[in-house]
Amino acid sequence: MGVDGGAITTTSVPVTTGSIESRVADVGAFRVARIVFPPELTLPLHSHPRATVAVILRGGFDGTTRGGSHPCPTGSMLTEPAGEDHGNRFAPAGATVLVVQPDPARAELLEPFAALLDRFDYQQNGFVGGLARRASNELNAGDAVAPFALEGLILELLATAARVRNPNGSRSGRRPPPWLDEARDLLHARPGENLRVSEVAEVIYKCTAIYRPDDERTLIWNDPDLSIRWPVEAPIVSGKDARGFPLSRAECYA
């Protein structure tokens, strides 16, 4: 940051500035990076030459702009337009961030995402977080198909985030119920824990609005993909539960 003729100027820097580890890949129209930042690092106001989409995989930071600051915990997504000033103050645990920077020369591909990429935006979405983790894994894959898988995941991530911001652009025109993201955020925040149904349901019931039967979905109780070892061999289930679908056929909101 400096002063030029009385006006405050900032520096355009790479997204890896200040990091202790990074892995970067150029796939199609995107530069994708998984970046590890050290604990309590502070980056003053700066900018990037490309628009930036950042999904926090671990840890977090406070994102600052000239208009204020916003906490960005694990699972959140932040978008920053090209050339716009912002700063970062990282948490005591540091942060691992998946960063996506579209190629501005590919305007025809990026046009559907313009409303997302051309402004500062913040959101927490379980689907976006899951796609970001899968994209991070593809950065490690190193095989011949990894670039194709990575590019596909990034396009799906941007499409999901854009639809959340513009639900009328989706086929259904409906946003998912608010409790759905709350439940997903809880599950993603506590990976590896044996959560009881009551712990997840507590979040769902606090956030659910008026009951709508047409919003209800049912998973089949004996889905082989879930491999749940039930303590009984022939349970008595309701007709509705017996007609449920396996998770592989479940409807997904985007």
Image: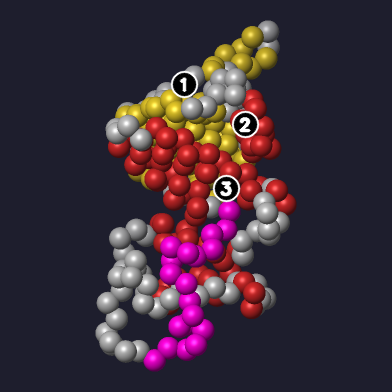
Lateral position of residue 204 relative to residue 166, left or right: left
CA gap, disc 2 and disc 1? 21 Å
Residue that label 1 marks = 14
Where residue 34 appears, as percent x and y from the top left, is 38, 34
Secondary structure at badge 3 equals helix
**Structural crowding at the residue carrying mark 1, measured as other residues with C-alpha within 10 Å and reported as few (<14), some (14–19) or many (≥20):** few
Q: Quadrant of residue 117?
A: top right
For residue 223, which numbered disc appears in the image? none
Position of 9 relative to 38 (above/below): above
Among the two numbered marks 2 and 1 on one chain, the one whose residue lies closer to the N terminus: 1
Q: Quadrant of residue 23?
A: top left
**Structural crowding at the residue carrying mark 2, measured as other residues with C-alpha within 10 Å and reported as few (<14), some (14–19) or many (≥20):** some
Residue at image point 30% right, 70% down: 227
Residue at image point 42% right, 35% down: 148
The amino acid on which the numbered mark 3 sits, given as a three-letter code, is Thr
Magenta-span inclusion, residue 249: yes
Secondary structure at badge 1 equals loop
Q: Nearer the viewer, mark 1 or mark 3?
A: 3
The amino acid on which the numbered mark 2 sits, given as a three-letter code, is Leu
The amino acid on which the numbered mark 1 sits, given as a three-letter code, is Pro
Position of 20 relative to 194 (above/below): above
Residue that label 2 marks = 110
For residue 160, which numbered disc appears in the image? 3
Residue at image point 33% right, 70% down: 224
Secondary structure at badge 2 equals helix
Among the two numbered marks 1 and 3 on one chain, the one whose residue lies closer to the N terminus: 1
Please provide the residue range marked out in magenta: 236-254
Mark 1 and mark 2 in contact (Cβ < 8 Å)?
no
Q: Is residue 87 visible?
A: no
CA gap, disc 3 and disc 2? 14 Å
Position of 223 relative to 58 (above/below): below
